[in-house]
Image (cartoon, rainbow, N blue to C red):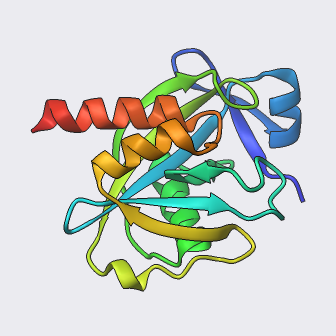
Amino acid sequence: MDELVERVDDQDRVLGVVVSRRQGVQEGWLHRVAVTVCRDERGRILVHRRSEQVSRFPGLYEVEVGGAATVGESYEQAAARELTEELGIRALPRLLFTFINRSGLSPHWLGVHEVVVSDADAVVPDPDEVAWHSWLTELELRSALLEWCFTPDTHEAVSRYLTFRTAQS
């Protein structure tokens, strides 16, 4: 079943129009997507390869875990739900920033979150969503971004995330 999402404007204000995500993507209508970057206590970043069974970008690598915010969901609620569904992690990710992402299937507002996973071994990916995962240092991640095939929005989201983290330290 296709997810129902709310259309938003170029200021990320809900327009009160509910559409299927499929239609929103086809028409290029702005809607909200929430993603989370997972770090462990050593500062490593979780990278995963999408399952071959997923409908969008099968087999590609990704740093963010997430999906569309459904009707009535905040960015934080959507991020927490997706984190549980895809990785088995029950946590409330912290929203860092939002931006209009034009590098995916269609333009959408992307809410980028972060969560620190205290027990890196507690990650239990859903095999229907995640085929492989590993924790990489920032240097290893930067190298992987140049060598591996990542989803279209990963490069911009990760670049903005790393810039944000650097500015905060």
Residue 135: x and y in percent read: 38, 65
- The residue closer to the viewer here, 95 or 136, is 136
Q: From the top left corner, tell me how far across and down residue 100 is, in percent.
A: 54, 22
169 left or right, relative to 163: left
Residue furthest to the top: 10
Q: Is residue 164 left or right of residue 78?
A: left
**What's the residue at 52%, 78% (across, down)?**
88
Residue 44 higher or lower than 70, as above or below: below
- Picture coordinates of residue 146, whole percent (x, y): 49, 36
Which corner quadrant holds the C terminus? top left
* Foreground of the two, 169 or 131: 131
- At 54% from the left and 46% from the top, the residue drawn is 34
Q: Residue at x 30, y 36 (%)?
A: 162
Which image quarter: residue 29? top right
**Residue at far left of view:** 169
Front residue of 97/18: it is 97
Image location of residue 9, percent across then percent down: 62, 18
The answer to whether residue 138 of the structure is visible from this angle is yes
Q: Is residue 133 above or below residue 108?
A: below
Q: Quadrant of the N terminus?
A: bottom right
- Left or right of 145? Residue 24 is right
The residue at the point 26 percent across, 76 percent down is 118
Q: Is residue 94 visible?
A: no
**Relative to 113, does residue 47 appear above or below in the rendering?**
below
Q: How many marks?
A: 0
